[in-house]
Image: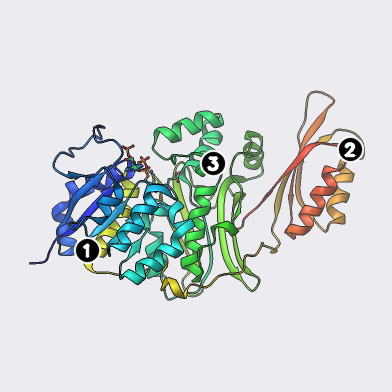
């Protein structure tokens, strides 16, 4: 008879409780699918007395996640506490040092320490897996490391933070304020313990850096991600973009070119009718382009109890079956350090500015664009009630980012322009 796979679960919040529910509800199915019973030897959280909505009396309790990770009756340490350092890192290191396999949903930990942890795991003969860390319930790590392993990945692009997508779509669809939409996302369990990780684009940047590592066989380089959150996206831009046929998304793009590895996680416009434009709420979408497969679109819940627990279970079941893949698809010691690069590829841009409504003002803006080699595709000026500044929207033809920057500098310096113009890249997918 095969021995059971024995888990130690640290963290009994949104994701940890979800994992416990699956393990309790589907024990027979999981055993049938892997050929082994999957049991929980011990659990750990900060508060032992908190009501978590599921019975936990029958499980051994540890106050210290490191002690849990080192228990003799734990084969797999399941880290669901969060945080890039502190107990999550200490317990993961302790588990690996003790030769345990580790499953984590912690993108912050891996984005900062993934290389060292993966090398340590390999040296110890352990596996370290993190399906739940990227795009919640979408099996994107499995898709890249397994299903698409016969391809050279040419580009990965996607919406990878449910909170940001939820806030942006609720602001647009329901006319909610940023604060109202944020409160709703919080109620749905989407938010990180530090919400700035979400709205600041950092959480999504962590995820992009992890995908880039797998896609290109490069060391995780979170510090090289060009990062901007949704804090500066105004309701005016959401409405204006919609009027021009676009949606605003916090969009991640990574690609390896002859110049190096481009990684950016920034608010961008996408066509409203495109799959990414139609993505609403906490849903995530990852588009992977491979040289042989073409384009693959993965869409699903990017956060929340059930979807994230589903992804944790994918890793647990792989370990139960004896599948022992490298953390980033190839041995960690063979991952290459990539040269960070900024995108120089021409793209269309959206520009919104406030312009004094007087003769010659628009001509000066057009001249500034023309002198920087930026050509206007479409333009719209809105009426206004007083004699002040009129909102003007411009969609450019494809322009070099350097040309766009030069044009914006010149436009900002015009006496006829009020405030700072907003410019967002339009991503073609
Ligand atoms: P959460 O609801 O805040 O739960 C965190 C859990 O960790 C709590 O049970 C907490 O204990 C426990 N914990 C924190 N510090 C601890 C310590 N020092 N010792 C022992 N236990 C400790 O977080 P979550 O949303 O489940 O997220 C967990 C991980 O999954 C994070 O890495 C997160 O980024 C990742 N993730 C979450 C989602 C999502 O949708 N929520 C999606 C993908 C990935 P108490 O309950 O006693 O306070
Ligand atoms: N806070 C994250 C999000 C959870 O909103 O997408 C899933 O990683």
- Dots 3, 2 in contact, CB < 8 A: no
Residue indicated by mark 2: 415
Residue indicated by mark 3: 199
The residue furthest right is 359
Above or below 250: residue 340: below
Above or below 180: residue 12: below
| Camera-nearest label, 3 or 2 | 3
Q: Which residue does the image show at 7% across and 67% down from the upper left?
A: 1
Tag 2 secondary structure: loop
**Residue 200, image x and y in percent?**
56, 43
**Residue 210, image x and y in percent?**
47, 60
**Residue 323, image x and y in percent?**
27, 69
Tag 3 secondary structure: helix
Q: CA distance from mark 1 to mark 3?
A: 36 Å
- Indicate left or right for 313 with 88 as reference: left
Q: Which residue does the image show at 18% across and 39% down from the upper left?
A: 56
- Is there any visible trace of residue 207 in the rendered image? yes
Residue indicated by mark 1: 320
- Indicate left or right for 308 with 407 as reference: left
Q: CA distance from mark 3 to mark 2?
A: 33 Å
- Indicate left or right for 270 with 193 as reference: right
User: Which of disc 2 and disc 1 is earlier in sequence?
Assistant: 1
Q: Quadrant of ligand 2?
A: top left
């Amino acid at each position: 008879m095969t021995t059971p796979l024995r888990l130690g679960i640290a963290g009994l919040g949104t994701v940890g409780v979800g994992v416990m529910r699956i393990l309790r509800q589907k024990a027979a199915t999981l055993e049938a699918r892997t050929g082994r019973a999957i049991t929980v030897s011990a659990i750990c959280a900060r508060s032992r007395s908190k009501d978590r909505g599921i019975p936990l009396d029958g499980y051994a309790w540890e106050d210290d996640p490191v002690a849990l990770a080192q228990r003799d009756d734990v084969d797999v340490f399941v880290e669901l506490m969060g945080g890039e350092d502190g107990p999550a890192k200490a317990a993961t290191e302790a588990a690996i040092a003790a030769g345990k396999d580790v499953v984590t949903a912690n993108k912050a930990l891996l984005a900062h320490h993934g290389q060292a942890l993966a090398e340590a795991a390999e040296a110890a003969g352990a596996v370290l897996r993190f399906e739940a860390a990227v795009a919640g319930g979408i099996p994107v790590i499995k898709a890249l490391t397994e299903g698409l392993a016969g391809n050279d990945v040419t580009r990965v692009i996607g919406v990878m933070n449910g909170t940001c997508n939820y806030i942006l779509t609720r602001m647009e669809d329901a006319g909610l304020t940023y604060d109202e939409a944020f409160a709703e996302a919080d109620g749905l369990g989407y938010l990180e313990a530090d919400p700035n990780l979400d709205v600041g684009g950092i959480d999504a940047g962590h995820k992009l850096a992890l995908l880039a590592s797998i896609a290109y066989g490069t060391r995780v380089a979170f510090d090289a991600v060009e990062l901007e959150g949704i804090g500066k996206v105004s309701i005016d831009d959401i409405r204006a973009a919609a009027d021009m046929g676009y949606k605003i998304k916090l969009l991640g793009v990574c690609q390896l070119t002859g110049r190096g590895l481009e990684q950016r996680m920034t608010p961008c416009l996408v066509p409203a009718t495109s799959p990414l434009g139609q993505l609403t709420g906490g849903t995530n979408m990852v588009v992977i382009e491979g040289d042989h497969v073409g384009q693959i679109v993965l869409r699903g819940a990017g956060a929340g109890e059930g979807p994230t627990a589903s992804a944790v279970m994918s890793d647990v079941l792989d370990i139960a079956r004896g599948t022992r893949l490298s953390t980033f698809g190839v041995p960690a010691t063979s991952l290459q350090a990539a040269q960070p690069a900024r995108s120089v590829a021409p793209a269309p841009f959206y520009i919104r500015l406030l312009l004094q409504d007087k003769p010659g003002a628009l001509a000066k803006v057009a001249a500034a664009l023309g002198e920087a080699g930026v050509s206007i595709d479409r333009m719209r000026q809105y009426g206004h009630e007083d004699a002040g500044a009129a909102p003007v929207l411009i969609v450019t033809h494809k322009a070099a980012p350097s040309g766009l920057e030069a044009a914006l500098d010149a436009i900002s310096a015009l006496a006829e322009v009020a405030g700072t113009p907003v410019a967002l890249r339009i991503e073609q997918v």
